[in-house]
Amino acid sequence: MSDLTTPATRPADTASGPERGRRIDGKAFAVSLRKQIAADVVAFHAEYGVTPGLAVVLVGNDPASEIYVRNKALETHHVGMRSFMHMLPETTTEAALLTLIGRLNADPEIHGILVQLPLPNGIDARRITNAIDPKKDVDGLGEVNAGRLSLGLPGLIPCTPLGCLMLLQSELGNLRGLNAVVVGASNLVGKPMALLLLNEGCTVSIVHIDTINPQALTRTADILVVATGVSGLIRHDWVKPGATVIDVGITRVPTASGKTKLVGDVAFDEVAPIAGRITPVPGGVGPMTIACLLQNTLTAARLSLSESA
Ligand SMILES: Nc1nc2c(c(=O)[nH]1)N[C@@H](CN(C=O)c1ccc(C(=O)N[C@@H](CCC(=O)O)C(=O)O)cc1)CN2
């Protein structure tokens, strides 16, 4: 930290000038990350004779979740890892799910375990995520990994915030000294995102449901990360000119032609001309989530070879 008595500013615009509205291509970034992971999986197998394995558990029939877990299995195979799918009925009890997690924890062929969220009513998501061995917790949602993140210690980091951080670092380089505002305080995205940015040296604020005058805060952000699930929440007058805007929201809405389309939490058309850089929806943060899951699975396979978590 520099001299606290001297006001320091770090402009959002870099030496390259006040560029506006450049799209951050998360899809392309995820493709190159997966290529790198595939090469790392080959090298890992050559060195240790181990193929990383990922178990994904889906309970119930949520159509979006079914697509996500199928894509997770496909992409796991594509990078040369082993995929273990467990599709359980909506009627599955918490006790049965805990028994399955116990089995997966004990299975040496499985290095990462993920239980797709949301879970049906009647199953306590916190109890489930905490039952996963912290070394296999590739979602980074258990108390051990969440605690490690809050202490700035190495651990498994939730996939979507990790993907956002990778995009930010590739766009902006060092984030130290930047003002970051995270809109949304969920355990899945908002809280870990804020901690990651803090650990990178940003000055971080979290806007949440009880925040008074949220625009006043969001307009201070060099980095604005939005994860609320409220489509179009962030309008042009919420954004500082030149800011880097990361939109985590994904909502399916009907179109005039009777079809549907995906939109984010940011009103893209009006914010893009003001923002320096902005992620689109789709094709921004979403594809990074699964790529980072694969990255975490490889990290977990490496952890399995070490003595302690
Ligand atoms: N246990 C978890 N559950 C959920 C997580 C998670 O990280 N862990 N995140 C989300 C869903 N999710 C992965 O599980 C996910 C969401 C979106 C995408 C994605 O690629 N989106 C594309 C659009 C895809 C489409 O056409 O529908 C994009 O934004 O371009 C991947 C994974 C909730 N549950």
Image: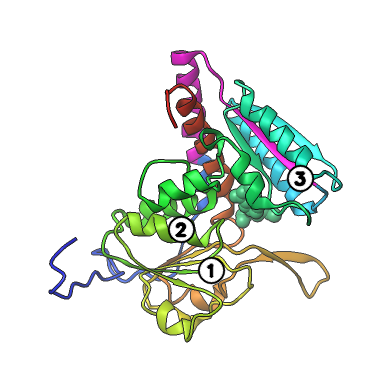
Q: How many marks?
A: 3
CB of mark 2 within 8 Å of CB of mark 1? no
CA gap, disc 2 and disc 1:
10 Å
Q: Which mark is residue 21?
A: none
Q: Residue at x 38, y 71 (%)?
A: 243
Q: Nearer the viewer, mark 3 or mark 1?
A: 3
Let me know if residue 180 appears in the view: yes
- Compared with residue 246, is residue 50 higher up or lower down, i.e. above or below? above
Q: What secondary structure is found at the residue carrying circle 1?
A: loop
Q: Nearer the viewer, mark 2 or mark 3?
A: 3
The amino acid at mark 1 is Gly
First-in-chain label (3 vs 1): 3
Mostly what secondary structure, the magenta segment? helix
Q: Residue at x 47, y 86 (%)?
A: 213
The residue labelled by disc 2 is 193
Q: Which mark is residue 184?
A: 1
The residue labelled by disc 3 is 94
Q: What segment carries the magenta color? A: 32-59
First-in-chain label (2 vs 3): 3
The amino acid at mark 3 is Glu
Q: Say if the magenta span includes residue 40.
A: yes
Q: Count neighbours of disc 1 (C-alpha within 10 A) and say few if under 14, some if 14 to 19, many if 20 or more.
A: many
Specify whether tag 2 is near ligand 1 (CB below 8 Å): no
224 vs 251, left or right, is: left
- Compared with residue 79, is residue 259 higher up or lower down, i.e. above or below? below
CA gap, disc 3 and disc 1:
28 Å
Q: Residue at x 60, y 20 (%)?
A: 108
Let me know if residue 29 appears in the view: no
Question: Residue 110: where, in percent of width, then height?
Answer: 61, 26
